[in-house]
Amino acid sequence: MAHPGQDAKFFQRGKIEEFRAELQAAEAKDKRFVKRKTVLKKIVANITMGTDMSPLFPDVVQCLGTPLLEIKKMVYLFLVSYGRSKPDQIHLVIPNFLQDCNDRNPLIRALAIRTMSYIPIPVVTDSLSDNLRHALKDRDPYVRKTAAICVAKLYAADPRRAEKGGFVEMLRDLMLDSNATVVANAVAALSEIGDRQDGVTFKLNLTIANKLLAAIPESSEWGQIYLLDSLLRYVPERHADAELMAERIIVQLQHGNSAVILTTIKALLYLMNYMENRELIDYICKKMGPPLVTLLSSGPEVQYVALRNILLIIQRRPSVLKNDVRVFFCKYNDPIYVKLAKLEIMYRLARAENAKEVLAELQEYASEVDLDFVRKAVRSIGRLAIKVEAAADDCIQALLDLIETKVTYVVQEAVIVIKDIFRRYPGRYEGIIPTLCENLDALDEPEPKAAMIWILGQFANIIDNADELLDDLCYTFLEESTEVQLALLTASVKLFIYKSQADRAKELVHKILKWATEEVDNPDLRDRGFMYWRMLAVNPTVAGEIVLAEKPAITTDSDRMDRGALDQLLLHTGTLGSIYHKNPEASSHKANPELLLMINQTFIRNAAGKALKDSPALNPQSRAVLVPLMRTQLPPTAVNVPGPGPVEPASEKPPSPTNAPVPPSKSDLSNEDQISSPSSLQETAPSTDDKALTDPNDNDPYSNLGGAFGNYLVDAPRPMTGTQGRHGEDEDLLF
Amino acid sequence: MGLDGIIVLDNIGRPIIQSGFRSSTTAYPLLHIDAVNNAIQKAASPKEVDPVLYVTPYNTVDKPSACCHVESGDIRMLCPVSGDVDPLVAFAFMQTFIEILREYFGTVSAATLRDNFDVVYQLFEETLDAGGHPLTTSSNALRDIVLPPSLLNKLLNVAGANLNPTINSGVGPSAGPFSSPIPWRKAGIRHANNEVYFDICEELKAVVNKHGTTIASFVRGKVEANSKLSGTPDCLLTFNNSQVLSDCAFHPCVRLQRWSRDKALSFVPPDGRFTLFDYRYSPGAALQNSNNPTRDNIAIPLAIKTNIVLEENGVSFDVTLLSRLSTHALETVEVELCLGEGASGIKCALARGLGGGGFVNASARNAEGSTGASWSYDSKSSILKWRIPVVPPSSSWSLKGSCTTSARAPRPSHAIIVRFEISSHTFSALKVDQLKVTQEQYKPYKGVRGRSSGVVEWRW
């Protein structure tokens, strides 16, 4: 700061030869090593810019004997950068390493150990082993804490040597060290080793776990994170142990560091699985709310991570933040990623008591500038109507007001959600159909178009001019997307069944069936066309019964995550898995295979995942959904590629990334009646393992399509399955 | 917990400095720089980029990873992470690192980092281990091992007198680094004048709907301390009205158990500036258990009246701002209205309404430039800004104007954002009862100040 611009000149790209000459010149008459320091600074500047300085290796190493810490540091920096690429010359430095390991200054002892551990070359590792053993017992805590981390490095370079050398045991001893930072670093190193596929498993017993707890108050924030995180490696054997431990860490919720707060919450959520005392669980839930809200006063980046985690937490523990929906109201100038995350939480927290407030907010958002946000807001109004029956009337009114605005994208979204509302509340809102028909021209995207066509077909009996409207829509049949074509096909069949006497309907269905079977390449469309054709030809009455069969009403109950998956994700609270809402460990879950595959490969390679472990203390709700932990690295989830042949509902699961041959999307599916064939049940059965526990009478073919559509569509309403989700054991869950 | 390293970019996306990425290939940091730059280019504004980006590997050796990034002044800090890592650790670490830089160099900018790259590099080494473990981040301990670039240091270097810890100097007279049993405070601190200051800063964030009803309002406050106390002082800070504090989050130095017991802050402070704790002001804490969700509403110190008319190809607006405070003035008031894409031809007239007459002093100060109010328009973001340096108590101000838009149906934002500051005022009226310093003989000089700011979103 004092001399701005002074050091900037070092960034000039220097030539190797020049530096070499300067270094040699600096050996003579270098008072207080000023010259050497200057040259080394230039060299380091070049390293930071990515220039290869490795040819200077022998020259720079010469300076290691200089008795000045600043110079030593720069030389070590150089060694760390190029040491591993010079296995033939590194032996030159070993004597200096050994000397420094025995220096009187603890900083230098630690520096030497640390630098050696960065160079995974056998000759260095050889001399490191002995010195590391001394360093782990050094009288100075700075050396001990540095050495603890170095063990993890040694382990990474040569696991068997580290085990044979007894280093893991020494780390275990360090967990009882008198200095909290040393304890924390030992735990960090053991965790790193334990997370490796080939590593020694790191488990804690009650005594050690309590010792670690005692070290928390004196640790730095990073140390606290390691210590709290390590509690997940402790499996309580008795309810009381878990409860006591939770009471001891709950005070950390008041820490100023956001990562400490989230790690504490993760540990609490984990321990709650092993608790019995309902009151304590409720108390902890109550305590978790305010710190989460506190996180929302941080920068948008932290807010985003917090919001994604809150979304998970409130699904598992709905009493958290139950009364705080206002906290999640979007500000006009929030970044879009924050707004979208808040919107989702607002929807989750909506209940009959606060539905009015939430609806008023959503209406505000529908007039905002950002298109994507407006669409999601409109969609949320519809979801709110489906979720909270008491608010349905108001929501419909709000949607009608929005349609009045004639803003195209608003109208389109409104139509999509209204279709679902019709299904949720049959016979209640059909009166608004004329308004919808007036806005037919505004629809130019496939999804709203298909939704509107569904409405036209479904209610062809009460819409006088349905045949006219459908006929108009048919002009462009061959240019439409598959989604719209499928909708038109079904709608025309419905129309024909309602009005089998009308010539126009007859003509229309004939025209479309002909197109679908003769002119279109898409096999789904063709097959469906043939099927309708045959049904109508064989027995129109039965066809009518099938096509217009009573549809199961839909609800949003099932648009939450599977309990077992949720429990596992919560163990990863705060981690990348919880951001993407994908469990890095489990592969059997109904998740988007694409994303899961990515997460699996990305974030868990070489690591052992976490899962709840069974113990006598595990409470029944959690045991019911226990997912066994697979230690071995599974091949990335099998991706089901839709094969040739008839389309079965199950083949919906892996959404193909391309738009090309789209299998019937979710919305068609729920329109279509023939798919409730029993075969779909078997198709989906294997992946319902854990769900079956919560929903023993789950005989609903759609319920499993959940995660298959990525994040955007999981919010789509699904059929209601009677008593689903109303079991006592689900009492923790959000409805 | 693997933070793979830190990269600092300047405001056009060029790398300034990065930590040594030792457990990865050299291409790894470059991939992350590209990923962030690409994302920024694609986004409508840099602010809208997802803070956690997924980065695909360019070959099969590297594993895929994610990049957490955050902007600070004219630099952007990147933290690539791989493995099952908590992104909050990355963000918390970057925040801490930015604070360390601020403490070392006064300001954090591309220029200061370039000037002091050697110090920054050393800081990387000491704060982040190559295995991704954050190490020493407490500036008190750091200053022992990485010397700040002080003027004194540079002068001494030039003069050839070297006070740097030389090799074999052994343990000096003042105890060596890390000898302090308290991680955030080094041992043997001496100050000629022992003083400690506390700043109570509160920020109001509120949303008001078009009927003028507050639908959400929160005040978050923090107590910033500046401690210049010798030795190892043990402080005990108590408040007269600690019941207004809720959802507190404390600096690690605060004894949490003691706070839970009797709402007193007991701590051994770090040396220098630090945030002692932050809190939420809850006015209704006294009426606990009432389930009325509006109990925490806080009075908004101003009111806005709008008359905005949307016409074909244009908007005309009339905004009135009214101070509801009776004793304090609102300062540096900034009113923001987004007029929607393609707005141009802005015409505005500013006026000062009635009220605030009793406050002659305040208006006299601005006598020269009539009112001192001004407006400006940024056509890139289509935001109209109206600035008023001082709004005296109970005064009213107005802005009238119009604009034309390229779209037939203009879509201005339905929210007006008002920012303001109030000095020597806190919403919570939090009052320090006393500060006791024990374990040391001296009587320190103590000071407490309050200030507030606010951001109100007023919808119409």
Image (cartoon, rainbow, N blue to C red):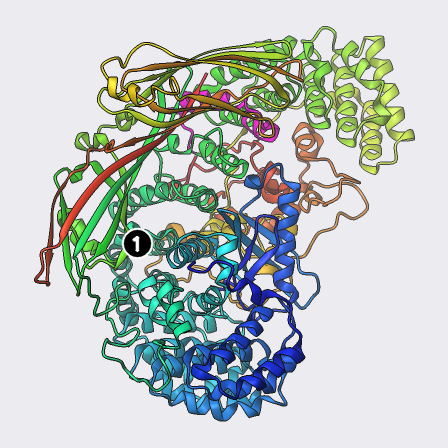
Residue A9 drawn at (x, y percent): 57, 64
Residue A708 drawn at (x, y percent): 63, 43
Residue A641 drawn at (x, y percent): 74, 50
Residue at label 1?
A: A275
Question: Viewed as shown, does residue B368 lie left or right of B360?
Answer: right
Instruction: Reply above or below: B356 against A139.
Output: above
Amino acid type at circle 1 is Met
Regarding mark 1 in the picture, which secondary structure is present there? loop
Q: Outermost residue, right direction?
A: A518
Q: Nearer the viewer, residue B228 or A219?
A: B228
Q: Residue at x 10, y 63 (%)?
A: B439
Residue A720 drawn at (x, y percent): 53, 31
* Residue range of the region highlighted in magenta in the rendering: A349-378
Residue A537 in view: no
| Residue B69 shown in magenta | no
Residue A426 in view: yes
| Residue A371 shown in magenta | yes
For mark 1, name the chain. A
Q: Residue at x 72, y 22 (%)?
A: A449
